[in-house]
Amino acid sequence: MDVHFDFDHYQVRLIKSADAVIIANYFMRNRHHLEPWEPKRANAFFTPEGWKQRLLQLVELHKHNLAFYFVIFDKQEHKIIGTVSYSNITRFPFHASHLGYSLDEKYQGNGIMQRAVKETVDWMFSVQNLHRIMAAYIPHNEKSGKVLSALDFVKEGEAKNYLYINGAWEDHILTSKINDAWKPD
């Protein structure tokens, strides 16, 4: 499946089996930067070998429309600088997914994530025909809150001890975006 969106010198595309080295490099480069916002990761998560196994699963999930894992690729630097993922995709009668994303520390504050999420949300709504996309963020992650707010994600509530992040249960702000153009298949 070839899905990609280009803007400036970036490309947002589905991750491929051949990306094991560059995705492992992305997570190694950003290990400490992402640590406060993510679950504790096994060492294999930061190696090409670990990613080869993970990519086999992700490519299968793509084929069956059960999840979509996008990467943000800097075409000038020839490296992955971020991820946008749609997981827990449920079809009838829910037609929904969870959204997650991360961005290289050196690329923060340039609108890249907002653009990547917008393009992929539009695709999830128009091509995958989802009705709802849900995203949650830790309350003190103001950057993430701003990305979602700018894209018209609406706060739906707060969840206590929602996700086990970096070795501790963290409260999260729950948001969603609804596809007003949704029609049954």
Image (cartoon, rainbow, N blue to C red):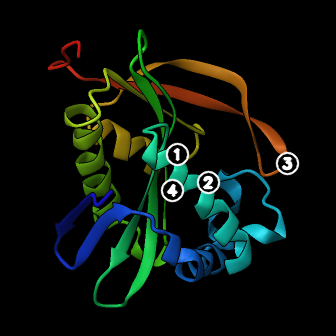
The quarter of the image holding the C terminus is: top left
The quarter of the image holding the N terminus is: bottom left
Q: Which residue is mark 2?
A: 57
Whether residues under marks 4 and 1 lie with C-beta atoms below 8 angstroms apart, the answer is yes
The circle on residue 167 is 3
| Residue type marked 2 | Gln
Mark earlier in primary sequence (4, 3): 4
| Residue type marked 3 | Gly
Question: Residue 95, relative to residue 115: is it above or below?
Answer: above
Q: Residue at x 28, y 90 (%)?
A: 76
User: Dot 2: few (<14), some (14–19), or many (≥20) neighbours within 10 Å?
Assistant: few
Q: Is residue 32 visible?
A: no
Mark 3 element type: loop
Q: Quadrant of residue 77?
A: bottom left
Measure the C-alpha gap from mark 1 to mark 3. Answer: 27 Å
Measure the C-alpha gap from mark 1 to mark 2. Answer: 6 Å
Whether residues under marks 1 and 2 lie with C-beta atoms below 8 angstroms apart, the answer is yes
| Residue type marked 4 | Val
| Along the viewing direction, whichever of 172 and 181 lies nearer the viewer | 181
Mark 2 element type: helix
Whether residues under marks 3 and 2 lie with C-beta atoms below 8 angstroms apart, the answer is no
Q: Quadrant of residue 24?
A: bottom right
Q: Residue at x 61, y 54 (%)?
A: 57
Q: Which residue is mark 4?
A: 59
